[in-house]
Image (cartoon, grey):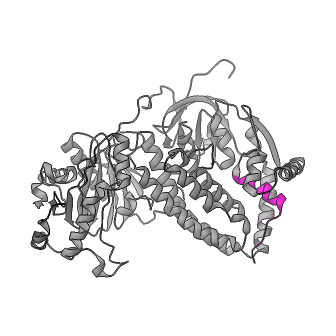
Amino acid sequence: MVPLREADGTCGAKAVGLRRLLDAGLAVPDGLVIPHAGRDGWEHDLDEALRRLGPGPYAVRSSALAEDGVRTSYAGQLATFLPSAPTDAPADASPDAPTDIAAAVRRTARSGGTPSARAYAAAVGDPVPDVVPVIVQVMVEPDAAGVAFTRHPVTGADEVVVEAVRGRGDRLVGGTVTPERWTVRGDATVRQEASTEPVITADPAITAQQSVEVATAARRVEHLFGRPQDVEWAISSGTLWLLQARPITTAPPAGTRPSQPGEVLATGTPASPGVAAGPVRVVTGLDDFGTFDAGDVLVCRTTSPAWTPLLVRAAAVVTETGGILAHAAIVARELRIPAVVAVDRATTTLPAGRPVVVDGTAGSVSAGPRVAGA
Amino acid sequence: MSAATPGDVLVLHAVRTLGYADADRIARRVGLPERDVVEHLLDAQAQGRVTSSSFAGDSGWSMTEAGRRHGERLLAAELEEAGARRTVEHVYREFLVVNESVTAACTAWQLAELGIGTPVALGETIAALGAAADALDGFEQRLTRHLVRFAGYHARLEAALARSATEPGWITATDRDSFHQVWFELHEDLIATLGLER
């Protein structure tokens, strides 16, 4: 058993990463690592080690060596056991008795060998050890939690995107709730957007000041590791804790960088990457479908299933409503065409027939070169 | 007592939820012989409610604005007659919450596939969509107690999910009954039934 502050190469990449955060003076919940949970002996020392760690509950997490690999990430593929939230379970259901912790450690250690983790490892050509190192950490019960990306996850822009939910962040990471989203450039929060249509964030989970605090910590992590990071964080009683950091593994594909010389006619939320040019075709309803030609830029308020044949033939799509999670955005990404959504008054301000360049990576519509006869 | 929707209304409504489809696909969707479906489609075309078009060698039926309005009137009348408005409204409100998790899971998967998001494991995506399908099963049971025509979404979602494990295209593809495609249809169905605007 190794204290988290002394984690070494036998303790798994996650534990080593957390130790580096601790060494840099960042707040990480205290913990210990069990490098070889498959071997006997550690159970006897667990009681005493937990006593030194402080009162529970504790989070039991995999520290799989391959999990935080730079090239591929197992992101959630290895099991993590968090104690039940105090509101939805009796207090004695949390694994804070040493025997429960020991059972959770054994389960987590074996999770490296689950069929899904094995299948994933086989698919990317990596070995998965049968038993993975396990981290036991003091559980912080957050008022708010989330993730921070030091590059925009869609555009690759050099800005910090902070996603936040009330309470524990595992629901966010598991994709079961939609977070509020803050974009922080430098140390100023430039915008807060609800990431999809019907989400009401009148009462945000964090303040603008806290979003900047999270972004600043994420920047420090990026500086520490020398590359863009995806950081899981939690705020508990005013203290910002970092729970995990891993590199953002893939840079945006070449050729999708924002690049257009023309005048910007409209901007919105980038929702499907890439750049494409074509004439503006404003379609206000089903009866306009006949006016649409292959290679046109579809400009509309929103889409329904009936619009998919237009999207199939469109060079790009611009909608007035929606967010990155909108059905139109999902269909556009599926069809690999650029999409810019939430463009205010697009159907009335973009001139019909005008050649434009849609940049679905930057979120802009700009004037394209005029072609003969257009 | 659960109400069965007449064939002509089923066909018109299928054109709305499928968006663009040939007679064969509509027939499979509504469970009627293709010959009958074609008759209903030709009647609706004569009344200006649906239109036939072809794109690149592929042809299909889609709705006109007049057909959309007519369909919504028929669905509203059916909803009142079945006494189902409150149930559908409640289900729709709960649906929107689950819709968030479906679109988030589809988006995370696509961004990872495009190489620009945080990598997401296929198993994780299938688990998130499976949880949504489970929730949908409950919605479908509540809806079909009043309106039989809501039956079948859960089975189609499960079928897409089962194929996703080996062919991930079944998550968001637009050329088949993928998970997102079926979910998008259900969203359109609820919107049409309640006469809402997107």
Q: Position of residue A220 (x, y in %)?
A: 21, 47
Q: Is residue B119 visible?
A: yes
> How many discs appear?
0
Residue A350 falls left or right of residue A118: right
Residue B38 falls left or right of residue B163: right
Q: Is residue A200 above or below residue A22?
A: below
Helix, strand or loop: magenta stretch: helix
Using the rendered view, name the quadrant where residue A96 is placed: bottom left
Q: Quadrant of the C terminus of chain B?
A: bottom right
Q: Is residue B12 magenta?
A: yes
Q: Position of residue A151 (x, y in %)?
A: 34, 42
Q: Nearer the viewer, residue B187 or A27?
A: B187
Q: Is residue A199 visible?
A: no
Q: Position of residue A129 (x, y in %)?
A: 25, 50
Q: Please tell me which residue is depicted at 76% across the width and 42% down the height of the picture.
A: B60
Q: Position of residue A357 (x, y in %)?
A: 55, 30
Q: Nearer the viewer, residue A224 or A139?
A: A139
Query: Magenta part of the protein: which range?
Result: B1-17
Q: Please tell me which residue is depicted at 73% across the width and 48% down the height of the picture.
A: B25
Q: Please tell me which residue is depicted at 16% across the width and 58% down the height of the picture.
A: A36
Q: Nearer the viewer, residue A31 or A158?
A: A31
Q: Please tell me which residue is depicted at 66% across the width and 49% down the height of the picture.
A: A305
Q: Is residue B87 magenta?
A: no
Residue A253 falls left or right of residue B60: left
Residue occupying the far top of the picture: A372
Q: Quadrant of the N terminus of chain B?
A: bottom right
